[in-house]
């Protein structure tokens, strides 16, 4: 077996894949949002307004781009407490080539379709796939959607493992248990961290819902095509703060590199009990190596910094 890294491409680009502005129920204008994210070193931003499609090429420059898309909701029968939300974003070149229907246009209102069950949900997902988009399921914990209520849906490419706004406002932001349950059941999904910012509090407030969940995408260049191709391939990591530089598999040897971490864990479909912990007085961890047993179906890693902030790799699928 040759060396298999989750990362491809030349360089990491930091971005927020889930943002609301005054165009839907956010408080910053699109211009203000771009300014605040640029100021903090972000290289891309996806405006994902409720139902309203955004395509802001006017913000694009050599060091910052926006990515088109929107956040789709569905209306469920009365009494159903679940809230299925999806990010709709451009797919890979290959997905674009296969598209049978046109993409949406800037400002288009897609409405909230009524869904009586999985068949309706699947029809809505398929409609987006037919247009060359890829579809991510958002914030399962906040949505009160269980893993086996996602499992019947085909064609999703990712799940929001960390939704910063859901976390800081309602303590319902982390969905890594749902992610692992889906992976264990054979659903190959990438994991993202996003802000889902609405900015109802001041930008410098402790409860500000910006700048707490992001992805770093390793791509060849900062263009919408290269970023979306890299995201489709899983060439990125999700984070609340820590950085990840490498996650690779060479035969049965796992190799991982990150910014100084207090704890590093290897996860899979069964218990791994493979970790590294920096004890008091010991240097923090920047590298981790382990040998697999050979029974693994997939592996992924999480690291924690001193403040308990985490970063997650995408899985490497072995079987
Ligand atoms: Zn949502
Ligand atoms: Zn949202």
Image (cartoon, rainbow, N blue to C red):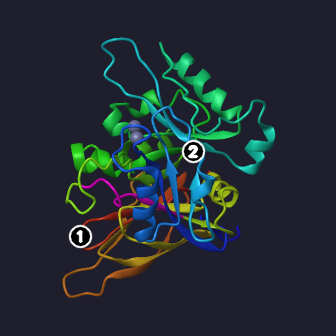
Would you say residue 301 is visible in this rendering? no
Q: Quadrant of ligand 1?
A: top left
**Mark drawn on residue 65:** none
Relative image position of residue 279 (x, y in whole percent): 22, 80
In the image, what residue occupies the spot 61% across and 66% down?
A: 61
Q: Which residue is mark 1?
A: 307
In the image, what residue occupies the spot 60% across and 67% down?
A: 218
Q: Which residue is mark 2?
A: 188
Q: Quadrant of the N terminus?
A: bottom right
Q: Main secondary structure of the magenta part?
A: loop
As drawn, is 216 to the left or to the right of 75?
right
Please report the bounds of the magenta region as a residue range.
208-216
The mark lying in front, picked from 2 and 1, is 1
In the image, what residue occupies the spot 44% across and 40% down?
A: 23
Residue 215 part of the magenta segment: yes
Q: Secondary structure at mark 1?
A: loop
Label 2 or label 1, whichever comes before in sequence order? 2
Q: Secondary structure at mark 2?
A: loop
Relative image position of residue 33 (x, y in whole percent): 42, 56
Corner quadrant of residue 147: top left
Number of numbered labels in the structure image: 2
- For label 1, count other residues whose C-alpha is less than 10 Å away and answer few (under 14), some (14-19) or many (20+): few
Corner quadrant of residue 226: bottom right
What's the distance in space between the residues labelled 2 and 1, CA to CA? 30 Å
Residue 75 part of the magenta segment: no
As drawn, is 9 to the left or to the right of 145?
right
Would you say residue 13 is visible in this rendering? yes
Q: State whether residue 13 is above or below residue 27.
A: below
Relative image position of residue 35 (x, y in whole percent): 43, 63
């Amino acid at each position: 077996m040759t060396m298999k890294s989750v990362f491809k491409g030349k360089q990491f680009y930091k971005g927020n894949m889930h943002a609301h502005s005054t165009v839907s129920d956010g408080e910053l204008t699109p211009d203000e949002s771009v300014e605040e994210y640029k100021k903090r070193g972000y290289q891309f931003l996806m405006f994902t307004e409720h139902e309203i499609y955004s395509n802001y090429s006017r913000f694009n420059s050599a060091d910052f781009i926006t990515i088109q898309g929107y956040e789709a909701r569905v209306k469920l029968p009365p009494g159903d407490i679940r809230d299925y939300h999806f990010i709709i974003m451009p797919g890979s070149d290959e997905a674009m080539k296969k598209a049978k229907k046109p993409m949406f246009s800037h400002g288009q209102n897609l409405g909230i379709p009524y869904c009586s069950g999985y068949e309706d949900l699947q029809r809505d997902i398929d409609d987006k796939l037919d247009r060359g988009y890829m579809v991510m399921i958002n914030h399962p914990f906040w949505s009160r959607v269980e893993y086996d209520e996602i499992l019947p849906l085909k064609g999703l490419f990712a799940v929001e493992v960390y939704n910063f706004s859901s976390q800081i406002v309602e303590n319902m932001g982390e969905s890594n248990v749902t992610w692992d349950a889906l992976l264990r059941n054979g659903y190959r999904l990438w994991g993202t961290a996003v802000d889902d910012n609405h900015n109802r509090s001041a930008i410098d407030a402790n409860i500000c819902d910006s700048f707490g969940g992001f992805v770093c995408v390793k791509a060849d260049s900062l263009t919408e095509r290269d970023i979306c191709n890299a995201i489709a391939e899983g060439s990125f990591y999700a984070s609340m703060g820590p950085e990840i530089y490498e996650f690779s598999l060479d035969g049965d040897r796992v190799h991982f590199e990150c910014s100084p971490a207090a704890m590093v864990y290897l996860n899979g479909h069964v218990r791994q009990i493979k970790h590294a912990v920096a004890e008091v007085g010991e240097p923090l961890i920047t590298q981790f190596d382990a040998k697999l047993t050979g029974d693994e179906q997939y592996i992924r890693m999480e690291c924690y910094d001193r403040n308990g902030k985490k970063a997650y790799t995408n899985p490497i699928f072995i079987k």
